[in-house]
Amino acid sequence: MGAGASLPANMQWIESNQGFIAVKEALGLAGKDQKNKLCYHDGDEMVILKKFMEMDRNGDGQLDLKEFMRKNKEHTDRKHPHDEFLYRFFGIIETNDERAVGIDPLVFFVCLHAFLVQDEDSQVSFCFHMFDSDHNRVLDQVEFAQLCRLAQPQMTDAEIAAQLDAVDAGNKDQVLDLDEVMGKKHRLTFQKLLWPVLRTADDLREKLGGEEYWQRRRHALKRAKKMRPNFEKGDLVGLFHDNLSPEDKQQMGLADEASEWTRYDDPATGHAYWCNNITGISTWEEPEHYQAYHGGANDEVDHGVYV
């Protein structure tokens, strides 16, 4: 039986969303893995959605962020600036203002699983994309400072500058790409830097479903990485958007597929690349329909922001 049978009328629309269905299958919440006890226990598909409904006190199908934080505050590190983290956390799927006043159950479900089901390396990568606000695949000095202060508000400007200088040990260009952040030399440094964020993830897992639920999701995702083509990194946000139908996008108020992309010039090589404004995924190949939507090959290039 699908989740829609147990959802209130104003939430049943998510059950036919193709992105939602793809994410559920990757998490063992639909399809063949429902017969695998390591991936699925009866009722798992409703665990997170029930939590959403418990917090949605007025039953309008939208969860106010303040309400979410009040519900979960005692389970999070009190020194952690919850507001900023959760605005950015849920905003990773939003296409407009990341400080939207309400979160729908679809965004809630996908974002929670994209962050909480992953290991610490994947969570560091997730945080990197949260703060790469201009989607140019690097953290500049301002973005890096925002990341540091989110995790450790007590850090001074001098400490942040020293941390950036230590990690940017290669070309000293004062920006960090994901390879520098996730490299063997500095990966543990970032895990320690983001410890309050990772601690928040541990606390949220305990509150929202319990560790056994998340263990089953990790087991299912590990299987999905092996069985699904082009899904080795387990990018649930990307999987969600890749599977949205035109009807799904229209219902969610998302832009046309071609308009989701912005073209940039790589500062190191001068070559053009395209970044998806929703998922943060970038590619050297021009996306299909991009020229038709943006007016041809000679359209003005958005060079992004570089330091």
Image (tube, rainbow, N blue to C red):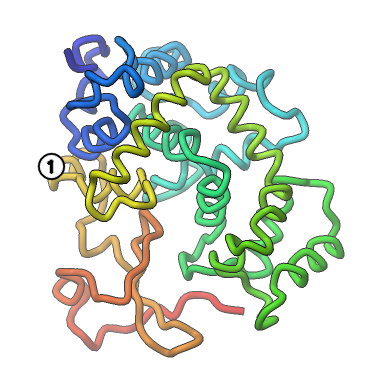
Q: Secondary structure at mark 1?
A: helix
The image position of residue 251, as x and y in percent, is 20, 38
Judge by depth and name the residue closer to the eye, 135 or 125: 125
Judge by depth and name the residue closer to the eye, 149 or 189: 189
The image position of residue 112, as x and y in percent, is 45, 33
Is residue 29 visible to us here? yes
Q: Quadrant of residue 278?
A: bottom left
- The quadrant in which the C terminus is found is bottom right
- Name the residue located 36 percent from the left edge and 67 percent from the top edge: 282
Label 1 Cα neighbours within 10 Å, binned few <14 / some 14-19 / many ≥20: few
Would residue 278 appear left or right of 241 to someone viewing this image? right
Amino acid type for the residue under numbered disc 1:
Glu
Q: Which residue is mark 1?
A: 247
Is residue 150 visible to us here? no
The image position of residue 57, as x and y in percent, is 45, 12
- The quadrant in which the N terminus is found is top left
Would residue 35 appear left or right of 137 to someone viewing this image? left
Q: Is 143 placed above or below 304 here?
A: above
Q: Is 184 placed above or below 200 here?
A: below
Q: How many marks?
A: 1
The image position of residue 83, as x and y in percent, is 63, 36
Q: Quadrant of residue 62?
A: top left
- Name the residue located 46 percent from the left edge and 25 percent from the top edge: 214
- Name the residue located 34 percent from the left edge and 31 percent from the top edge: 220
